[in-house]
Amino acid sequence: MPGSPRCYHGPVWIDRDVGDLEPGRLMTFGAHFSPGSRTAWHRCRYEQVIRVLHGVGRAQRRGGRVQEIRADDLIVVPAGEWHWHGAAPHAALLVHSVREAGSPGPNTEWGPHVTDAEYLLPALSALLPRQGGDRIPNREASW
C-alpha cells in the first residue's frame, strides 16, 4: 500500500509482512522508497531493526549526522529514539524492518517532515571512504 503523505515524503510503498501473530509479538515490514523519498521524523515505542536489502539511502538520528546506508547494512534504532530514513537523492531503497508489536494503540509517534535542508546535508560516508571492516555482519549499529 502507498505510504501516507502524513508520514512519508515522496512515493513510498509499504508491505506489512507479519504482525501480531500469537504467541509472538513481532511485526515485520518492507518499504520501497523512490529516489528522494523518506519518512518523517518518528520514534517507535519498541526497538526497531532495519536491514537494507537493496539500493542506497540515508538515515539520521536526532542530533546525529546524516548517514549513508547501503545493501547489507543493519540499523538498530533504540526504543524512543527520534530518527528518519529513506532513499538517497538519486537512488531507490528497499528495506525490511522488524519490531515488537506491543500493546494496542499507536506504537509509532510521527513528528514533522524532514526538511530538504536536513535531508540534503552531506552524508557521513560521502565524506569518509567506507572501509572493508564496515561490512562485518555482526558489527555495532552504524550510528
Image (tube, rainbow, N blue to C red):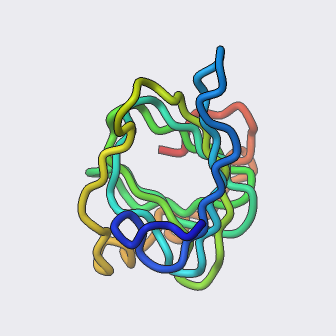
Of 143 and 113, nearer the camera is 113
> In the picture shown, does residue 63 fall above or below 87?
above
> In the picture shown, does residue 19 fall above or below 116?
above
Q: Is residue 60 left or right of residue 86?
A: left
Of 131 and 82, nearer the camera is 82
Locate the N terminus and report the quarter of the image it occupies.
bottom right
Residue 59, percent from left and from top: 47, 58
Q: Which residue is located at x 62 percent, y 36 percent? A: 19
Of 84 and 56, nearer the camera is 84
Location of residue 121 (image quadrant): bottom left
Q: Which residue is located at x 32 percent, y 34 percent? A: 80
> In the picture shown, does residue 74 fall above or below 100?
below
Q: How many marks?
A: 0
Q: Is residue 15 left or right of residue 3?
A: right
Q: Which residue is located at x 65 percent, y 34 percent? A: 139
Location of residue 14 (image quadrant): bottom right
Q: Which residue is located at x 43 percent, y 67 percent? A: 4
